[in-house]
Amino acid sequence: MPTERPELETVHLLRAVTVELGLHSARFAHLHGMHPTDVRALIVLMDARRAADEVTAGRLGAALGLNSAGATALVDRLERAGHVRRARGTADRRKVVIELDERAVELGQAFFGPLISRVAELLGGYDERERAAVHGFLEGVLRAAAESD
């Protein structure tokens, strides 16, 4: 059997990591009676919060590949569960934005926090140049995945 190119070994390893992270996320969804899309929505909202960016239902739906009705149903579901709330935008009070409730943040931290800590600890073992290479690689993979649609 021919030896696989080293870069393909890395691609296959990345695929395995993606599958494992998806399973981890699915366990969280199942444990909390959520749909996998709900978990992805919370991730989008947490990333936006970290970037101090406001997200409307339409923008959330676009990030998740949902139409307007699907985005509204998603936000309604998350709001009923106490994970998000609708609020007025800070820059434009006419705009309705979706905000995370602190309970959702705490729930995510309790479940995903240990994994995040282990990954951060792993990265701590790399020097600045190595971390920059990993970061650049992952940014490139993200761009490639986004452009392949």
Image: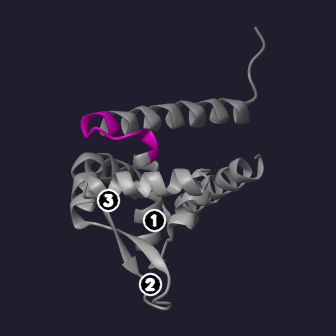
Q: Name the residue under label 3.
A: 79
Residue situated furthest front in the rendering: 69
Q: Which of marks 2 and 1 is nearer the N terminus?
A: 1
Binning the other alpha carbons within 10 Å of mark 2 as few (below 14), some (14 to 19) or many (20 upward) gives some
Along the line of sight, which residue is nearer the eye, 102 or 129? Answer: 102
Q: What residue type is labelled 3?
A: Glu
Q: Which mark, residue 47?
A: 1
Could you tell whether 20 is left or right of 67 in the image? left
SS class, disc 2: loop
42 in magenta: no
Q: How is the image coloured?
A: one colour
114 in relation to 75, above or below: above
Mark 2, mark 1: which one is toward the viewer?
2
Q: How far apart are marks 3 and 2 (CA)?
A: 17 Å
Q: How far apart are marks 1 and 3 (CA)?
A: 18 Å
Q: Earlier in the sequence, mark 3 or mark 2?
A: 3
Mark 1, mark 3: which one is toward the viewer?
3
- Name the residue: 65% across, 53% down: 142
Q: Can residue 13 be seen in this view?
A: yes
Residue 93, image x, y percentages: 45, 89
- The stretch of residues the image draws in magenta is 29-37
Could you tell whether 54 is left or right of 106 in the image? right
Residue 134, image x, y percentages: 57, 54
Q: Mark 2 points at which residue?
A: 89
Instruction: Give residue 101's quadrant in the image.
Output: bottom left
